Image (spheres, rainbow, N blue to C red):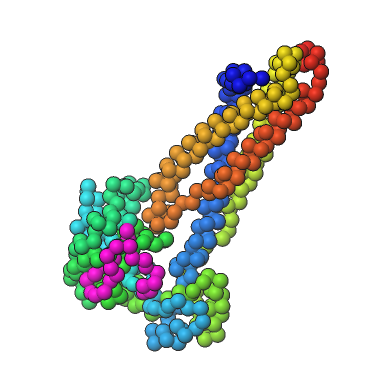
């Protein structure tokens, strides 16, 4: 069989109604499977990355005197210890970054451990009035309009050359400096940290104390005479950052033995996460089973329909091997057309989701992982299955004599 003969037969087979239906059905099912794998991978990686980040390795002790800093910091497996007032940080409006009717804002955090910050350009904070911001800087909140939709406008990102040297003012919310304005200058940029907001800038602890509230919370009550009172609750605890998540339990046990009651700063809803992972896993298994059955049924029906054609080709002198090769290449082309369509649909959905329901992940500098390795493995397995199914079906048919095939 010449190459031109093969190309003519393959071209004719590709435009058949059965192959077009197979391409459409398999593309949709493969997209669903890839989506399920992506969700499972996202949940697993998010859980792992969160536990191993600073927020996942932090213990908090309430109602403890700060004089115990040295005592606690001497424990094994400790990165650093500090007041729990520094655990969260705070967001401030910065008019200098206002643009397109969108308020500029910066989320400030104090520098507690310089080793966690990788300077990209410029320098680290060396004195009062200096700050460092992310190399990929978005000086706004995700809420950019009056709706409840969270959005990020890519055109509003700033990079190192846009911000180094820029000065701005912040109004203090500290009760001792209420209303006082402080000027800060961006002296460097750092590599965006996972789980830090896109607008997180770091400054010295001394500067942070000047602009942040003195109180952890303000509560109120009404006494028996109907007079309302306010209670100002000061920060009175410690944050303890452990060097590795596997040492959390060891450090907790040591703290309990010292008479303290530590609690983890970030606690997962394990049951919810399991549901989020198990539901797409179950759906993935079901869809894979359905896909395999549909593919086998399509190939079986196609080969049975082509029995007479096989008989004609054999009567013209073509060997079983040549006929199988033509069918195999026809199926492989159909398979890769389906995969291409699936990938296009997959990436369209992925980028839509990334900019809508998953925008909070992006804003927290969390890379939404595309499981390329698993997707490649999935495609490879399905390709082998396609070829295996086809070989099995067509070999069984071609083992019949020519007269049997022509009668069909």
Q: Is residue 166 left or right of residue 322?
A: left
Residue 295 or residue 182, whichever sits in front: 295
Residue 228: x percent and y percent? 30, 72
Name the residue at 43% across, 43% down: 351
- Where does the N terminus fall, quadrant-wise? top right
Task: Examine the rendered structure and indicate whether residue 354 appears above or below residue 68.
Answer: above
Place residue 64 in its image quadrant: bottom left
Q: Is residue 118 magenta?
A: yes
Q: Is residue 9 magenta?
A: no
Residue 72 visible within the image: yes
Name the residue at 28% across, 54% down: 158
Name the residue at 58% across, 58% down: 271
Residue 132: x percent and y percent? 29, 65
Residue 370 or residue 1, whichever sits in front: 1
Residue 175 visible within the image: no
Residue 120: x percent and y percent? 33, 62
Q: Which residues are magenta?
A: 112-135
Task: Examine the rendered structure and indicate whether residue 54 appears above or below residue 352.
Answer: below
Residue 219 or residue 155, whichever sits in front: 155
Name the residue at 55% across, 85% down: 257
Q: Is residue 57 left or right of residue 315?
A: left
Task: Examine the rendered structure and indicate whether residue 135 appears above or below residue 245.
Answer: above
Place residue 128 in its image quadrant: bottom left
Q: Is residue 306 left or right of residue 31?
A: right
């Amino acid at each position: 069989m010449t190459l031109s003969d093969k190309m003519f037969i393959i071209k004719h087979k590709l435009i058949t109604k059965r192959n077009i239906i197979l391409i459409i059905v398999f593309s949709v099912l493969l997209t669903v499977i890839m989506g399920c794998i992506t969700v499972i991978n996202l949940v697993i990686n998010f859980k792992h990355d969160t536990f191993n980040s600073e927020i996942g390795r932090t213990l908090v002790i309430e109602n403890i005197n700060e004089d115990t800093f040295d005592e606690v910091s001497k424990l094994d497996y400790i990165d650093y210890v500090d007041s729990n007032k520094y655990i969260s940080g705070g967001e401030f409006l910065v008019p200098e970054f206002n643009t397109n009717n969108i308020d500029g804002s910066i989320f400030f955090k104090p520098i507690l451990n310089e080793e966690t910050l990788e300077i990209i350009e410029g320098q680290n904070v060396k004195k009062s009035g200096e700050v460092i911001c992310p190399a990929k800087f978005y000086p706004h909140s995700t809420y950019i309009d009056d709706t409840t939709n969270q959005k990020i406008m890519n055109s509003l990102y700033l990079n190192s050359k846009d911000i180094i040297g820029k000065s701005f003012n912040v109004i203090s919310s500290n009760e001792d400096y209420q209303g006082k304005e402080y000027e800060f200058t961006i002296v460097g940029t750092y590599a965006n940290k996972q789980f830090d907001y896109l607008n997180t800038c770091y400054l010295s602890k001394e500067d942070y104390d000047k602009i942040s509230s003195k109180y952890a919370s303000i509560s109120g009550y009404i006494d028996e005479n109907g007079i309302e009172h306010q209670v100002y609750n000061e920060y009175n605890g410690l944050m303890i950052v452990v060097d590795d998540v596997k040492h959390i339990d060891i450090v907790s046990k040591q703290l309990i033995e010292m008479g303290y009651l530590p609690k983890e700063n970030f606690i997962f809803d394990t049951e919810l996460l399991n549901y989020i992972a198990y539901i797409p896993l179950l759906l993935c298994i079901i869809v894979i089973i359905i896909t395999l059955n549909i593919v086998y049924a399509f190939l079986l029906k196609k080969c049975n329909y082509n029995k007479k054609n096989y008989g004609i080709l054999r009567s013209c002198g073509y060997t079983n091997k040549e006929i199988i090769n033509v069918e195999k290449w026809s199926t492989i082309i159909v398979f890769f057309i389906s995969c291409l369509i699936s990938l296009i649909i997959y990436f369209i959905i992925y980028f839509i989701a990334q900019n809508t329901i998953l925008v909070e992940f992006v804003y927290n500098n969390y890379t939404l992982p595309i499981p390329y390795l698993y997707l490649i493995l999935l495609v490879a397995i399905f390709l082998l299955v396609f070829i295996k199914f086809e070989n099995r079906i067509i070999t069984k048919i071609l083992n019949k004599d020519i007269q049997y095939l022509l009668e069909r």
